[in-house]
Amino acid sequence: MTKYVITGGKPLYGTIDISGAKNAAVAIIPAALLVDGVCRIENIPQISDVTLILNILQDLGAEVRTVNRTTVDIDCSHIRNQPVPYQLARKIRASYYLIGALLSRFGSAQVPPPGGCDLGGRPIDQHIKGFTAMGADVDVRGGYIHATARDGRLKGSQVYLDIVSVGATMNIMLAATLADGLTIIENAAKEPHIVDLANFLNSMGADIMGAGTDVIKIRGVDRLAGGTYSIIPDQIEAGTYMAAVAAAGGQVRIHNIIPKHLECITAKLQEMGVSVVEDGDDLVVSRRGALNRANVKTMPYPGFPTDMQPQIAAVLCLAQGTSVLTEGVWDNRYRYVDEFRRLGAQIQVDGKVAVIEGVSQLTGAPVRACDLRAGAALVIAGLAAHGVTEIDSIYHIERGYEDIVRKLTGVGADIKVVITPDQEEAQPNVG
């Protein structure tokens, strides 16, 4: 069994470099399927989700060459349109981007339903609505999603999303890039990684306008050529380390970020009494006094991100007074609460609302990461807790955080990886 062992109660001091954005990388890499030639992608995070999606592309016939630790060259000139490997795709939610990319390039796709963290149902009805509007037939049989353009090539269309969906927005963008004519996505999501995907595609020759607003227009082109593109810094990784400083105390410079992407997180931490000072492409985060209670509701960007909900919960557990946390995106994001209670947190959940009574101190205990962001939140709680916290099922955390142990030890945390050779770690069903 591989686990993290954290001896908490140590303030954090130093600098943490932020890696490339996970949520951008897992869409931009499938987007390389649309490129007829070599594309170089820089600032790729070294995480297991990226490794999986690169392995899938190689299985489809792509040539992937590692240039350095954060840069790869991908050549999809000789890609094959074949079923995406089931066991690989079921370990990652972002596998659904392969539907839009393959459907756009070949007019058909066979992809398993998405896996990844278990946050409740992962319907892709809005994705399918977009594909259908562009002239595709979509059904599920034999454990695969089968999508086929009726005329061999998708047709531009107008798509109104019934809910603001990041995944659907990006998948429809991919599908529309090589479609015939103009596609308009209304009620589109506006997250930074949507803008990053549009910028990547445009740098390769696509014609996409309006990314970052609620109306995106994609005029299909005949082909994309090669080029070089660098992925944006990870908003959620940066927010996670900001929350870690808020919980554990100290002062840390968060380096290589886009401050605007973090404004919603910055504002909430400042409300809680944390100092956040912008310095160019850095934020200096410090906390020495008591934490104030706060109410937080997750919303689509530019609101407070759902992917930061468990991490801010860890901070609220140590705030003075009663805080209310409302989940506005996922139905099943509070599975971590029982683990927090093992550390001494006082949390009551009713549906999408969690009421958190702040405690003066958390106490270390054995806990389990039940998903990616919940695992990161347990790391934060462990850093602040008195005593030793052991976190198992850390494969969840490594899906989305590059070198988290090295980065935290670099700012004074006492965290290490421990391997117990006489036990076998239970493997995830869906990643």
Image: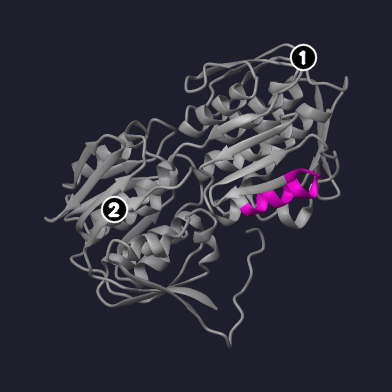
Please tell me in which quadrant of the rendered image residue 222 appears: top right
Q: Residue at x 57, y 25 (%)?
A: 198
Q: Report if residue 430 is visible in the image.
A: yes
Is residue 212 found left or right of 431 in the rendered image?
Answer: left
Q: Residue at x 41, y 66 (%)?
A: 338
Helix, strand or loop at label 1? It is loop
Image location of residue 140, percent across then percent down:
81, 42
Which mark, by number, is residue 15? 2
Dominant secondary structure, magenta = helix
Residue at the disc numbered 1:
180
Give the crowd class for mark 2: few <14, some 14-19, many >=20 residues within 10 Å.
some
Q: Is residue 2 above or below residue 299?
A: below
Please report the bounds of the magenta region as a residue range.
51-63
Comparing labels 1 and 2, the label whose residue is closer to the camera: 2
Please tell me in which quadrant of the rendered image residue 304 appears: top left
Is residue 341 found left or right of 266 in the rendered image?
Answer: right
Image location of residue 330, percent across then percent down:
50, 44
